[in-house]
Image (spheres, rainbow, N blue to C red):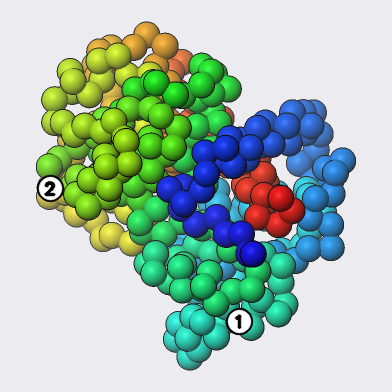
Amino acid sequence: MIKHFLDIKDINIDELKTILSHASELKSERINKPKGSKDVNQLLKNFVVALIFEKPSTRTRFSFDVGVRQMGGETISVSQSEIHFGKNENIADTARVLSRYVDLVILRTFDQKVLFEFAEYSSVPVINGLTNQSHPCQVLADILTYEECRGSIEGKKVTWAGDGNNVCNSYLQAAVKFGFSFCFFGPEKYRPEPKLVTEMENSGGDIFLTTDPNVAFRQAHLVVTDTWLSMHEADNTDKIKTFQMFQVNSEKMNIAHRDTIVLHCLPAHRGYEITDAVIDGNSSKVFDAAENRLHVQKAIMNWVLNS
């Protein structure tokens, strides 16, 4: 059976923990090594990996590409304009064809339906590199980062500040799997989809939504934020004004738990969703999480191909 990595909610917690444990091992093995050196265990030796990016990318593209090379594999990276992807050829046929050429596909696209359709017709594993609806690789990297610094995330309080976007959705799914409480702090108009919230609550998730910073930040162990405008959105002055009171700043962080960690999936719009003082402060592990994308995604690739 082909094993895909599409959404956190579809993967057993034991397997998610196995991925994180392997990511830690892979990370420790690379201490003081040049970035281009090969891993001792060439887990992707002789494998070819397709990186398909309908959306622009910095961290996802570089981390997957470097990760494949470190594991001994080779990559073919293309943008939307370079292939017939849902334009002159339907998604199903593209999936069928690429499955004959490569061993693994990383797909970064807009609509989640495209991801699932591609996976349905692919005869090789597919990994979700981001959609408008979810970003599971980022959230696993965040969890690894938190647990490196503070131990198990189980039973902790995670506060999301901002828009109920794709990363937020994956956090909702992770709350159920990893057993942490999840507080959404953002405008009512931009809350995550009620259907998803209800689904996660019915699955045992401890989830609450608020516009009160005292409720959101008090005793929070992890605070996460993201840009108010997604990369496919045009500049929206009214939306920015709506979100101003939900900025992560020093005043709000003073309410939080003294050991609180702050994360941001990047790119950050400094002075909007987060201030310089916070992102560059002692509580910030933003760039550690960006590095951990590399190690987590290497573990995910090994999981879909070799476990």
Q: Secondary structure at mark 1?
A: helix
Circle nearer the viewer, 2 or 1: 1
Which residue has dot 2 on it?
189
- Is any atom of residue 235 visible in this view? yes
Q: Which mark is residue 96?
A: 1
Left or right of residue 220, residue 34 in this image: right
Taking depth in this image into account, of 123 and 269 the one nearest to the observer is 123
Residue 225 visible in image: no
- Count of all numbered marks drawn on residues in the image: 2
Which one is in front, 74 or 181? 181
Corner quadrant of residue 147: top right
- Lateral position of residue 180 relative to residue 187, left or right: right
Residue lying at 49% horizontally and 62% vertically, measured from the top left: 108
Picture residue at 53% right of the left edge, 64% below the top: 107
Q: Amino acid at mark 2?
A: Lys
Circle 2 residues within 10 Å: few <14, some 14–19, many ≥20: few
Furthest-right residue in this view = 40
Q: Amino acid at mark 1?
A: Arg
Q: Position of residue 184 (x, y in %)?
A: 24, 34
Tell which residue pokes out farthest to the top in this image: 258
Residue at the image position 28 percent from the left and 23 percent from the top: 249
Instruction: Answer with left or right where residue 157 lies relative to residue 297.
Output: left
